[in-house]
């Protein structure tokens, strides 16, 4: 495979494992353990059975007729929004909790921004009867109160983090700090294709079920197993990684990703790391980072809490640099508009994160026969208030 990770966890120049010495052993143990466990028949059977009966997979591949007519292509939506807990994140958590159990870990920690990964983690910990502690920036605890209550109801302990900007990036740092204190019994469940090697590879593998299903679903529907375009939104990069995983080396398939432009990439209020980031180390990996000239990590800004991260997974830093992925920055107003558009044309309220991917349709020119698969990473129930509050933004931009 042309683009896969090497044995030290590098995707081209990006990736690796830059961890404090105290975590050296636990990270190396994980590097040695993950592949044999994930590839074992026993793991695969348990993982697949939970994905089917607990998560509700396969997620449908839905032909969006009205949107297809509008954009002059054949548009299929990969419905990750229909998964248990409302997004793709549960795929990863199911896999990692099984991995943690097989490694004999008894306590799970995780970081969360909007709370989606926290909820998915708390969910699988309840399922597996494991102790669960979630680190979440205090600002996010206040903004995302319902998800905090959900986590608490599921039995997780939520720690509001009061360092830095009190958002996702600080929650990651705090989770790493906790892991340093309890490396032996604790498994750190990373929520996206980021962090030190082997996490980006683990998370990409756990989400790869998305493209595995797309293959046979397309074969069934159109008689060939690949699309002309794959489109997904990208925060840390996990739903995008899952969407493209089995197509990365297939040059017939164009890959288009949407990152969060916030107010615009020419302003200070953006989360478009691939456009605006420079090379640096963030949370244990070399990647693109939004940072000041002296290396301080900048706060990311976007209307979408799930894309609010000043870094990007190393896999996407590499694929974007090599031109394998085309990355578009979608601004807040464009995402809000696209969210309304999908809602009104197909009756599907997407997560604001996913609405960024929908907005990419406007920026592409298709041939009438083009087959486009767009991943709807999550459902928008959590975002209804934001959509309604910002409706004016969509009005100014379009005509809802
Ligand atoms: C967390 C989240 C994202 C962003 O994370 P990725 O790792 O980039 O996929 C996108 N969509 C939804 C619905 C999310 O919850």
Image (cartoon, rainbow, N blue to C red):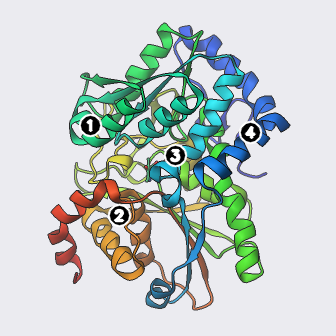
- Specify whether tag 1 is near ligand 1 (CB below 8 Å): no
Residue at the spot of label 3: 89
Q: What's the CA distance linking mark 2 and mark 3?
A: 22 Å
- Specify whether tag 4 is near ligand 1 (CB below 8 Å): no
- Specify whether tag 3 is near ligand 1 (CB below 8 Å): yes
Q: Which mark sits nearer the N-terminus, 1 or 4?
A: 4
Residue 318 visible to an observer of this rendering: no
Q: What's the CA distance linking mark 1 and mark 2?
A: 22 Å
The residue nearer to you, when weighing 194 against 80, is 80
Q: Which mark sits nearer the N-terminus, 1 or 2?
A: 1
Where disc 4 sits, the SS reads helix
Neighbours of disc 4 within 10 Å: few (<14), some (14-19), many (20+): some
Residue at the spot of label 4: 46
Which residue is at a point 25% across and 67% down the rendered structure image? 333
Figure check: 327 above or below 192: below
Figure check: 13 above or below 28: below
Which residue reaches farthest right? Answer: 41
Tell us which disc is closer to us: 1 or 2: 1
Figure check: 394 above or below 240: below
Question: Which numbered dot is residue 140?
Answer: 1
Which residue is at a point 43% across and 38% down the rendered structure image? 119
């Amino acid at each position: 495979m042309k683009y896969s990770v090497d044995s030290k966890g590098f995707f081209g120049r990006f990736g690796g494992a830059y961890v404090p010495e105290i975590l050296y052993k636990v990270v190396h143990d994980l590097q040695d353990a993950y592949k044999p466990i994930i590839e074992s028949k026993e793991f695969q059977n348990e993982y697949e059975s939970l994905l089917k009966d607990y998560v509700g997979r396969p997620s449908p591949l839905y032909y969006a007729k009205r949107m297809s007519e509008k954009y002059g292509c054949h548009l299929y939506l990969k419905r990750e929004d229909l998964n248990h807990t409302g997004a793709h994140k549960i795929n990863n958590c199911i896999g990692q909790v099984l991995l943690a159990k097989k490694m004999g870990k008894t306590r799970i920690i995780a970081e969360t921004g909007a709370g989606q990964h926290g909820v998915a983690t708390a969910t699988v910990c309840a399922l597996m009867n494991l102790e669960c502690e979630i680190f979440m920036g205090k600002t996010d605890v206040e903004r995302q109160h319902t998800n905090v209550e959900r986590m608490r109801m599921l039995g997780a302990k939520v720690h509001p983090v009061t360092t830095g900007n009190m958002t996702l990036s600080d929650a990651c740092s705090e989770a790493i700090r906790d892991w340093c204190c309890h490396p032996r019994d604790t498994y750190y469940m990373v929520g996206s294709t980021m962090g030190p090697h082997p996490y980006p590879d683990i998370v990409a593998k756990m989400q790869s079920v998305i493209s595995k299903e797309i293959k046979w679903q397309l074969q069934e529907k159109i008689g060939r197993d690949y699309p002309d375009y794959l489109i997904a939104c990208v925060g840390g990069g996990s739903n995008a990684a899952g969407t493209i995983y089995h197509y990365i080396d297939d040059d017939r398939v164009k890959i288009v990703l949407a990152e969060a432009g916030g107010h615009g990439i020419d302003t200070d209020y953006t989360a478009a790391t691939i456009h605006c980031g420079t090379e640096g180390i963030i949370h244990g990996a070399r990647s693109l980072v939004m940072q000041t000239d002296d290396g301080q990590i900048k706060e990311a800004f976007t209307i979408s809490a799930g894309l609010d991260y000043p870094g990007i997974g190393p896999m996407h830093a590499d694929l974007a640099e090599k031109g394998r992925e085309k990355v578009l920055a979608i601004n807040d107003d464009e995402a809000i508009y696209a969210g309304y558009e999908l809602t009104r044309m197909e009756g599907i309220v997407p997560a604001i994160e996913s609405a960024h991917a929908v907005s990419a349709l406007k920026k592409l020119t298709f041939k009438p026969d083009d087959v486009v698969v767009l991943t709807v990473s999550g459902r928008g129930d959590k975002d209804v208030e934001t959509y309604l509050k910002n409706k004016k933004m969509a009005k100014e931009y379009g005509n809802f």
